[in-house]
Image (spheres, rainbow, N blue to C red):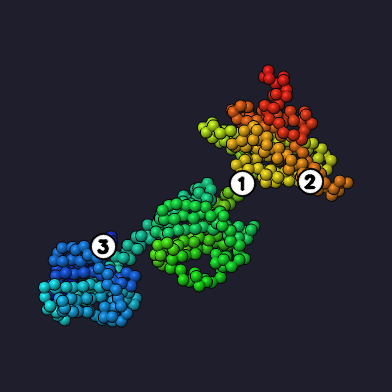
């Protein structure tokens, strides 16, 4: 009895320290137990997916590389042992074997695994005293294994929390929501070993969830802008946003898919969805808790970024026409010039002036004039290509950048726009005609033949515009056409 107590105390003092990993603990523990209990081979089996998997095998002070899985049949003696309904399990054929459980000491005693002791050259059974000693040693190892796992989990969660906090800081410093979202979703999938993370943001005007970005464990991101989920529909995302309970499919995959509503001051702004549908790995409860707490930081960062973008948009775009302001146009013009200088692609700039606009204001009032500019702005945004960049240059003047468009291409594009403009009708209820038609004069200059700087190109486009005005307005003219039709210009 005294020798057993001394053995237990020695092993307790040797294991009662901080191990960085459970592998380090098990290696040290198995060596100590092997010296204390006379067995030829000791195996450590840990519970995994309802089975017992061999983690370590020590054979007479030598580590064996063995791959063994024991399937636990219902109500089998070994299953009852793992469940805690037996203190030990022994056999003598083909040699003496003893199993003792590794069980958690907290709560109801979670099953951790078993220790297996073998006497390979003897059928002499393990005595009652040996079984008791083995059980006490297993209990000591289980207690330290549980403590090591808890410590590792705390360190892992702390590391993740620090990483997520850093991600939130990076997100907050990003210039655009899309850039910040990509960074944070890639970080979440990486630090939590998730297959995928997706973000949807609330579009209040359309009363729908709009997809933003998806990221996977490999660090790849893709746009979800094509996805739109009406909040009044039966989609599970819509039900979550409405605060309704989970459906049968959500319950079926609740261990592998987590839905995290994002809210700021009690108002939902979006939904974060993370999953392990490819790997089919369970998402640990502690990870879900950390993600739920971090969802608040994500929501606040997204809301702040969206507000910043809205304020920035107000300063970059004209509120009446929806076109960019002159300052923003100048910035984009320089960027486009830099691109064409490096790549050699054509670039055209267009100046547009609404014909007789002063007469519209004087004859019908500024409200009608503003309505004419507003409708003209809508028409421009609707008819131009996605790569084109229009701006309100001042008053009734509009300037447009046409990347990858030669002078001829630009003339064709503007010809179609002018034709559409002629069809536009502005309602004037108090006039006898009840409506007003609008025309415009359009001048075009192209890089590099008409100029290589923004100033030169704008000046040449303005000269072409003036040439249209002198020829009766309501037309399109390139700078080269103006030169050809005006001989005196050739001497410049």
| In front of the other: 479 or 311 | 479
| First of labels 1, 2 by sequence position | 1
Q: Identify the residue at image location x=25%, y=70%.
A: 45
Between the residue at mark 1 and the residue at mark 3, the CA separation in whole angstroms equals 55 Å
For mark 3, give the secondary structure: helix
Image disc number at residue 342: none
Is residue 206 among the parts visible in the rendering?
Answer: yes
Q: Is residue 465 left or right of residue 298?
A: right
Image disc number at residue 23: 3
Between the residue at mark 1 and the residue at mark 2, the CA separation in whole angstroms equals 29 Å
| In front of the other: 478 or 47 | 478
Classify mark 1: residues with Cα within 10 Å, few (<14), some (14-19) or many (20+).
Answer: few
Residue 216 horizontal/vertical position (percent): 44, 55
Q: Identify the residue at image location x=52%, y=63%.
A: 261
Classify mark 3: residues with Cα within 10 Å, few (<14), some (14-19) or many (20+).
Answer: some
Residue on which the image places disc 2: 425
């Amino acid at each position: 009895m005294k020798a057993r107590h001394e053995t237990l105390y020695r092993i307790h003092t040797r294991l009662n320290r901080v191990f960085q990993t459970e592998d380090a603990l098990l290696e040290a523990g198995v060596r100590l137990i092997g010296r204390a209990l006379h067995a030829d081979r000791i195996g450590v089996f840990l519970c995994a997916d309802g089975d017992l998997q061999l983690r370590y095998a020590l054979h007479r002070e030598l580590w064996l590389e063995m791959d063994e899985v024991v399937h636990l049949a219902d109500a089998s003696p070994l299953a009852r042992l793992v469940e805690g309904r037996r203190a030990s399990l022994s056999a003598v054929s083909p040699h003496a074997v003893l199993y003792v459980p590794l069980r958690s000491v907290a709560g109801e005693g979670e099953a951790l695994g078993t220790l297996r002791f073998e006497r390979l050259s003897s059928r002499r059974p393990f005595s009652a005293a040996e079984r008791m000693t083995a059980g006490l040693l297993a209990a000591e190892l289980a207690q330290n294994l549980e403590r090591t796992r808890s410590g590792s989990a705390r360190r892992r969660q702390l590391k993740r929390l620090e990483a997520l906090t850093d991600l939130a800081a990076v997100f907050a410093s990003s210039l655009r929501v899309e850039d910040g979202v990509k960074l944070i979703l890639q970080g979440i999938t990486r630090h939590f070993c998730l297959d995928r993370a997706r973000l949807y943001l609330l579009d209040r005007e359309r009363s729908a969830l709009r997809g933003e970005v998806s990221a996977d464990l490999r660090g790849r991101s893709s746009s979800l802008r094509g996805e739109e989920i009406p909040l009044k529909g039966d989609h599970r995302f819509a039900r979550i946003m409405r605060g309704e309970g989970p459906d049968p499919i959500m319950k079926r995959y609740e261990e592998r898919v987590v839905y995290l509503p994002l809210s700021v001051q009690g108002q939902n702004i979006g939904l974060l969805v993370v999953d392990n549908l490819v790997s089919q790995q369970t998402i640990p409860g502690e990870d879900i808790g950390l993600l739920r707490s971090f969802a608040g930081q994500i929501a606040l960062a997204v809301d702040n970024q969206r507000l910043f973008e809205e304020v920035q948009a107000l300063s970059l775009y004209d509120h009446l026409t929806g076109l960019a302001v002159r300052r923003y146009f100048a910035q984009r013009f320089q960027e486009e010039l830099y691109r064409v200088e490096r790549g050699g692609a054509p670039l055209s700039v267009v100046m547009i002036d609404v014909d007789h606009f002063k007469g519209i204001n004087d004859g019908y009032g500024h409200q009608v004039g503003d309505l004419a500019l507003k409708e003209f702005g809508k028409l421009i945004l609707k008819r131009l290509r996605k790569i084109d960049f229009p701006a309100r240059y001042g008053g009734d003047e509009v300037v447009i950048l046409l990347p990858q468009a030669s002078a001829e291409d630009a003339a064709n594009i503007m010809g179609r726009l002018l034709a559409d403009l002629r069809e536009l009708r502005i309602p004037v209820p108090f006039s006898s005609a009840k409506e007003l038609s609008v025309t415009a004069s359009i001048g075009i200059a192209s890089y590099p033949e008409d100029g290589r700087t923004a100033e030169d190109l704008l000046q040449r486009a303005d000269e072409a515009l003036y040439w249209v005005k002198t020829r009766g307005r309501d037309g399109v003219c390139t700078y080269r056409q103006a030169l050809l039709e005006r001989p005196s210009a050739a001497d410049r």
